[in-house]
Amino acid sequence: MSSHSHVYVQGDVTIDPSAVISSGVILRANPESQVIIAAGVCIGAGSILHADQGTLEIETGVNLGTGVLVVGHGTIGANACIGSLTTIWNASIERLTVVPAGSVVGDVGRQVAEVCAPATPPVDSYNPPEAVNHSPKIASSPSPSPEQPEQQDANPPVDSQRRSSESTTEEEPESANSPAENSVYGQGSVDRILKTLFPYNQ
């Protein structure tokens, strides 16, 4: 006789002594509901059997893989094999039936894949504000345009003005030096000073 002290049991649950139940299994029956585990049943770790609005019966020799979820009412026929991570909602499984792992049996409206399936958004609803805000920035960014060569062609007078200004700046020192070369302004004063200092040496 096996012990099922490691199994969480709540409500009206009947377990045959020969059933093998792994740790972490939850057997729960709501009010006015019942869970019946027959002889030779093997339930994998982490499975949950939750009876609701009726009787949930697991017949002789049934093998439930790990992480199986059975919710509602129904019957899993004798010697049926339920793959791991399978979900059964208010449905019955025929005897000697093999259910692949990860299957969903019963209420297909509760399938996670259909509920979480991403819907394609309408084209009009997807209007990122960043794209609209950044478009003028992209248009105003400096980029080569066909008008720039024309502007460069129209600007040579500015270059000629710069060259003329440079030529005038170069000519200014020469004009400043021209009075130094012409000795007319200082010669008279020098002659008077020499005559005053040396009156006999003219």
Image (tube, helix red, strand yellow):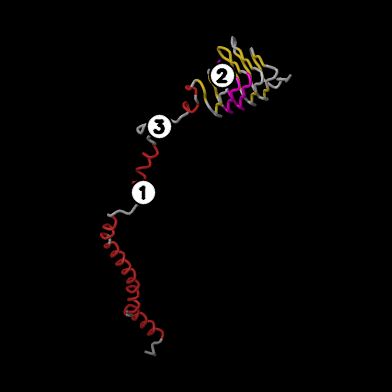
Position of 156 with respect to 34 (left or right) is: left
Separation of disc 2 and disc 1 at Cα? 63 Å
Nearest the viewer among 123 and 60 is 60
Whether 170 is among the magenta residues is: no
Q: Residue placed farthest to the right in the image? A: 1
Return the mark for residue 71.
2
Whether 78 is among the magenta residues is: yes
**Label 1: element kind:** loop
Instruction: For the residues labelled 2 and 1, say whether their Cβ atoms are less than 8 Å apart.
Output: no
Magenta span: 60-85
Of badges 3 and 1, nearer the viewer stands 3
Give above or below for 81 relative to 181.
Answer: above
Task: For label 1, count other residues whose C-alpha is less than 10 Å away and answer few (under 14), some (14-19) or many (20+).
Answer: few
Image quarter in which the C terminus is found: bottom left
Q: Amino acid at mark 1?
A: Ser
Task: For label 3, count other residues whose C-alpha is less than 10 Å away and answer few (under 14), some (14-19) or many (20+).
Answer: few
Of badges 2 and 3, nearer the viewer stands 2
Q: Residue placed farthest to the front in the image? A: 96
Give above or below for 22 relative to 175.
Answer: above
Nearest the viewer among 176 and 202 is 176
Give the labeled residue for mark 1.
Answer: 141
Q: Residue placed farthest to the bottom in the image? A: 201
- Percent position of residue 105, x then y: 52, 23
- Percent position of residue 61, x then y: 63, 21
Nearest the viewer among 55 and 24 is 55
Give the labeled residue for mark 3.
Answer: 120
**Label 2: element kind:** strand
Upstream in sequence: badge 3 or badge 1: 3
- Percent position of residue 40, x then y: 66, 21
